[in-house]
Image (cartoon, coloured by chain):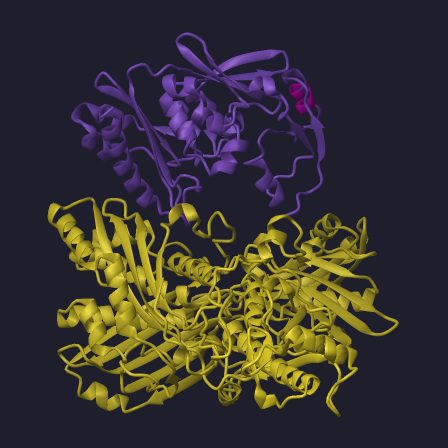
Chain colours: A yellow, B purple
Amino acid sequence: MAATEQATYIGAPVPRREDRKLLTGQGSYIDNLTLPGMLWMALVRSPYAHARIVGVDVAAAAGAPGVVAAYSGHDLAGEWGGSLPCAWPVTEDIEMPPHWPLAQDTARYEGDAVAVVVADSRAAAVDAAELIQVEWEELPAVTDVARALDEGAPLVHDNLPSNKCYVWPLEGGDVAKAFAEAEVTVSERYRQQRLIPCAIEPRGVLAQSLSATGELTLWSATQVPHILRVTLSGVLGVPEAKLRVIAPDVGGGFGSKLNVYAEEALALALSRRLGRPIKWIEERTEGFQATIHGRDVIQEIELAATKEGRITGVRVRLTAAMGAYLQLVTPGIPLLGAWIYSGAYDIPAYGFECTGVFTHTTPTDAYRGAGRPEATYAIERAVDALARAVGKDPVEVRRLNFIKEFPHTIASGLTIDSGDYDATLDRVLELAGYETLRADQAARRERGDVKQLGIGLSTYNEMCGLAPSRILGAIRYAAGGWDAATIRCLPTGTVQVLTGTSPHGQGHETAWSQIVADRLGCTPEEVEVLHGDTASVPLGMDTYGSRSLAVGGVALYFAADKVIEKARKIVAHQIEVSEDDLEYAAGKFKVKGSDEGMSVKEAALAAWTAHNLPDGMEPGLEETAVYDPPNFSWPAGAHLAVVEVDSETGDTRLIRYVAVDDVGNVVNPTIVDGQVHGGITQGVAQALYEEAVYDDDGTLLTGNLTSYLVPTAAELPSYELDREVSASPTNPMGVKGVGETGTIASVAATMNAVIDALSPYGITDLDMPATPERVWRAIEEAK
Amino acid sequence: MIPAAFDYEVADSVEHAVELLGSREDAKLLAGGHSLLPLLKLRVVRPSLLVDVGRLTELSYIRDDGDTITVGALTRHHDLATDALAREHAPLLSAAAAQIGDPQVRHRGTIGGSVSHGDPASDLPAVLLALDAELLVVGPGSERFVPAADFFKGVFTTAVGPQEMLTAIRVPKHGDAGTAYLKFRRRSQDWATVGVAVVTRNGGGAIALTNMGATPLRARAAEAALADGPAAAGAAAAEGTSPADDVAASAEFRKHLARVLTRRALEQALAG
């Protein structure tokens, strides 16, 4: 904080102002919205992973009660100005097959939409969708990422020579030398299973077209209204200025709503074609098939080290499933992890290569952590493997390799801003009672208890706060990484904030009001935060990648600077002193050494009346700042998981979880704790519970919340949290991102605990999730 | 998740419900709705008529009938789990009910609905089998008690005919028997991967398994081996079973779980 201001609200656990509205049913989710004359849309989806669409007969559906229209993919081909977008062509020679909102000749995954029906009620639309006759010719499919490049594997796009999408390399330091001279090497292969995001609110859209003006409005349950406007104007072939996108209250995204979906384009096109508003709400089972999935990567990681356990090189090879098509940022997701496979460790040589492959599956894309949980998982499991190889405690090997001084440029080429990795590790061991835990574990092993203990560490770091625009440009991302904020001081003393971030559960209205209240000397209640409507907030890059505070929040800070600067000029003019004679604190300008002065609120009124402003000054007190971060933000921390394994049934339960995070300065500790709790749970879910399973034909066997096991509070302990603070030197608030840290850390901590519990059997690897059956089989085989 | 269209009638008596069931070949009874509604929403079932028996409050009771406890078909799982009479005289039934689903399910779901549904993964059927319960089935002008051993016919199939309704369940008071219901599940609200109900008395006992075949099963080999102790009985628990092989667990793992859970349940029951 600047020395001139008091931190009254920043850092305080201000209750979330969003909650009263949402908890009392006064929120406005897509499903709460209704427009006069509105129609409902329902889709027909492929029951096959791969099939030729021989014919689509919509006649029976079109004639059904309440139905207004029904279309095949070919019927609507003329609506599109372009394919659904992929904004991240990661290499020059990447294969980017077209992706139409409705498949026309071939369905490429179970759930690929092939026809649409529009009716005057949701029930009529769903009933009529059953009447659409599709003649299929089923084709062979490949759903396993590890088999996509096999000789003779069925092609996802038969105009391409293979299922290869791209190969993307990165190298820093002399990797070959590091491995040639290594005293010890570790070579591991890990499987990041496929995950299904399962936000509580399903996706939904409402589209309205006004033929008189050509204006199109889209309400969507999205994280990215601004990106939608830019991209959908191209898909629909309309001027960007004619398209308005609104994200109302949105019930969770986790990356799954960071996308441009077929249903958004379809609703707009059908509204334009039929002249009536079109609504669609995703069914939960549709969400399992037609909303993006996460992960699905095979990882091979090798460490070169000395016999003491000092790591000298890391080499990584990934095979990453794209799914059937490239969604908005599908190819780039593994690359968000590419920079940090060396983890929190000072490793001079680094080699990385990722091969993206198509499979007959739902497209993958950003899912909480997006590339970084995978990276942390690989390096943290490999470091444990190294500890076993050199006969040391995992704590000792970590300390030996930690980066100690900051800023620190890592071998992948990026510079870590700040941190104190020993401090978070010290604190987590103290809080957890590490020695006591190890003694308990030893005693259980000694007694041969049925329930064995496992202790796992993850000393992670990560890069977030996406992102410096120049770096995004260098890695071929199609947009910038800046964000914008406007502060509008109203004449009667309250303040409107317009933010380019688009919250969907993060509590930006609360946190942004805290920032403005401290900077302008008002209360948070006097600050109204507007977001998620491209008509009222034209500038923005939305919410994902733990960017909102570290980019959008910092933009808000700079907008406050501009407001204070203009207010200072007004005050100096009105009380006839030099600007230099004014000192500013807590919303008040005072003439140095006296009580004479004016508040920001008084300056706002003076700016509005414009009766007495400096010559040439524009009336009004409203300022916008656009902030492009010069670096990522680099949270870090140490997490410790304790699991109990029933050695007879394989049942594996998380019984304690201790997390010490360093996310820089904190604006609202309650919100940060909530992010950490939820983030940890999402990672534990990957380690122990969740897995999308396809059968050999490409049918999703885990197609609902009964078979896809999202854990609940009943399965999990309450987590023990603490924080260290290394302020980021990158921005004046010293803040970093926090939205993904929990997930990035906890997958590795939990699986390291599982492996630790099983280590007396000689078990050193287990696929995720560590289901009871997998654990039981591993024990049986080890016996 | 929009069901196909159906008609809806509210029954004001058991006789009325049976009469309504007779009015359509594909009519279905609706009680707590916790098995039926998901199937309707997935369009797995498409009855043309739903007969709502949810307002027949006279079927919600737990009654002391001397040597037996009688439970009305519309008794909610939560009531069974917390009722003092049930806990004293039918603790196995009560303990199993407490493990069903989550609090919302237990407050809406009914014993009659759950048992009539005939899902092999449901908890109460195995319990009723182990207890030698009798189930009262009412049809047009008929009323009969069906022993639990004859009630469960297959997956989603029971002895309740298309124009019949289960109205009550009678279980012997447990007396000094040791009992236990153990259920293996990944999440607390999940159906049983495998469940085991045991009733031990005078060195012998009844053992019934959940989700080890198309219906709940008596583990006869385990019962025969019980004289040699829980470990021997546990080792024999999977004999004669044919569990599903699915995404939740392989058949082999289910058999393993049945062995471990049977041993543990017996140990728990014998420990009192």
Residue segment shown in magenta: B17-22
User: Which secondary structure class fits the magenta region best?
Assistant: helix
Residue sticking out furthest to the left? A446
Q: At which x and y percent is residue B116? A: 52, 27
Q: Position of residue A111 (x, y in %)?
A: 58, 60
Q: Is residue B101 left or right of residue A58?
A: left
Q: Residue at x 37, y 51 (%)?
A: A718
Residue drawn at x 67%, y 73% is A601
For residue A733, side relative to residue A35 (left or right): left
For this orientation, the residue located farthest to the top is: B66
What residue lies at 70% left-to-right and 70% top-to-bottom?
A: A245
Give the vertical position of B57 relative to A287 (above or below).
Answer: above
| Magenta run includes residue B132 | no
Q: Could you tell whether A395 is left or right of B209 in the image? A: left
Residue A608 rendering spot, x and y as whole percentages? 76, 77
Q: What is the residue that sits farthest to the right in this orientation?
A: A212
Q: State whether residue A249 is above or below residue B162.
A: below
Asked where in the image residue A282 lies, by quadrant, the reply is bottom right
Q: How many marks?
A: 0
Q: Residue at x 60, y 52 (%)?
A: A20
In the rendered image, the residue lying farthest to the front is A594
Q: Quadrant of residue A765?
A: bottom left
> In which quadrant of the rendered image does the C terminus of chain B lie?
top left
B99 relative to A430 in the view: left or right: right
Can the viewer see residue A236?
no
Residue B18 lies in the magenta-colored region: yes
Q: Position of residue A357 (x, y in %)?
A: 46, 75
Q: Is residue B186 above or below residue B18?
A: below
